[in-house]
Amino acid sequence: MPPRVPLLPGLRALSGHGSTVSPSTHICRTFASTPVDQASTVQQKRRHRDPYALAQARARKAANISRQEVLEKERSSALGDPVRGIPTAFVQSFETAIPSTPTPASSNDTHAATRNESASPKQSPPGPNAQSEEYKNFFLTQREIKDASLRSEKLNAPVADQDFYETNDPEEKQRREQERQQYDQERKQKHATATEALNRIVSLSNGSSKDRLRVNIQRCVDAFGRHQTDKKLPPKPPVAESILLKNPSANTQKVERAGPDTGSSEVQIAILTAKIKTLADFLESRGRPDKINKRNLTVLVHKRQKLLQYLRRKERGGPRWQHLIETLGLTEGTWKGEISLR
């Protein structure tokens, strides 16, 4: 037997006075109006299953994506690509870490990347050939490789020519001379083969992307470091006298650098550009599903944007700014406005 539901006082009065409304009707209405949260949850569940609502959501998403594409095209046409900018010879050489034009050598001989002193101006332009590369792998310099090759040749040289016993036979002398010439020819051929093998081992064309990035960082220091650019770019104009009268501390003299410039804004922007190009090429070719590196690319682009805004504010379109922009091919899209990468 089902349990009895007690009647409320109001319902008893109605039932006692001969009302036409039954008590069960009032109970059903009361319980149907109380659980509001449960009704809203059910409504939300029905909405997720509604094909018309799903079609509307898809249409809104497609409209948003198409609008983002239109805005991105308008921004690219007006300001340029915020990631790659304009391709230049210096930026394209990041792929092989081989400069297309001679770059100034670093003043510190401890660096692995130094200029190839043996290269002549009549040689072919730098390419994958190890003989024409200015930078070598494994922190080696061209001078060190040349000295090691000469030392190896000296160690493999034969003992001073001397006859252990005298002979007057002309045929025997001729035979010894032929053997000596043949031995010298074989020794030179082996030395040439060893030198070519050494050049191929230290060549950046056979190195990893990490090795090329390390050399590209050193190239950026040599190309944009102020220990090199101060020699060819005009200095910053002096502070005006009106500013000195208001702020006497503005004429502070800077301390002379103790070594290569590795921390200025120009060098950091160039290093970030090298990393951005490497990462963008990877994501475009074989790293499409790599979400972590997509975020890393966004972080690097925005970090470069902040440094560019700072350098532009400090230099005010001066020679350093122009040299950086023209060499790296950076457009207004790399520093101006809001950058969003999908």
Image: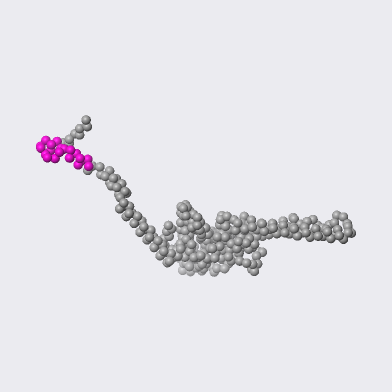
Q: Residue 59: where, in percent of width, then height?
A: 34, 56
Seen as rendered, the residue at the extreme left is 17
Q: Tell which of 316 and 81 is nearer to you.
A: 81
Residue 7 is drawn in which quadrant?
Answer: top left
**Residue 310 can be seen in this image:** no
Q: Residue 137: where, in percent of width, then height?
A: 61, 56
Give the quadrant of the N terminus. top left
Q: Residue 77: where, in percent of width, then height?
A: 43, 66
Question: In the rendered image of this protein, does residue 332 appear above or below residue 51?
Answer: below
Q: Is 59 part of what is drawn in magenta?
A: no
Q: Tell which of 335 and 277 is nearer to you.
A: 277
User: The magenta stretch spans which residues?
Assistant: 11-32
Give the quadrant of the C terminus. bottom left
Residue 115 is left or right of residue 72, and the answer is right
Q: Residue at x 87, y 55 (%)?
A: 165
Q: Residue at x 42, y 59 (%)?
A: 340
User: Coloring scheme of the render?
Assistant: one colour
Q: Is 30 part of what is drawn in magenta?
A: yes
Question: In the rendered image of this protein, does residue 5 appear above or below residue 165?
Answer: above
Main SS category, magenta section? helix
Residue 68 is drawn in which quadrant?
Answer: bottom left
Seen as rendered, the residue at the extreme right is 168
**Residue 188 can be seen in this image:** yes
Residue 33 is left or right of residue 73, and the answer is left
Q: Residue at x 33, y 52 (%)?
A: 54
Residue 340 is left or right of residue 207, and the answer is left
Q: Residue at x 64, y 57 (%)?
A: 200
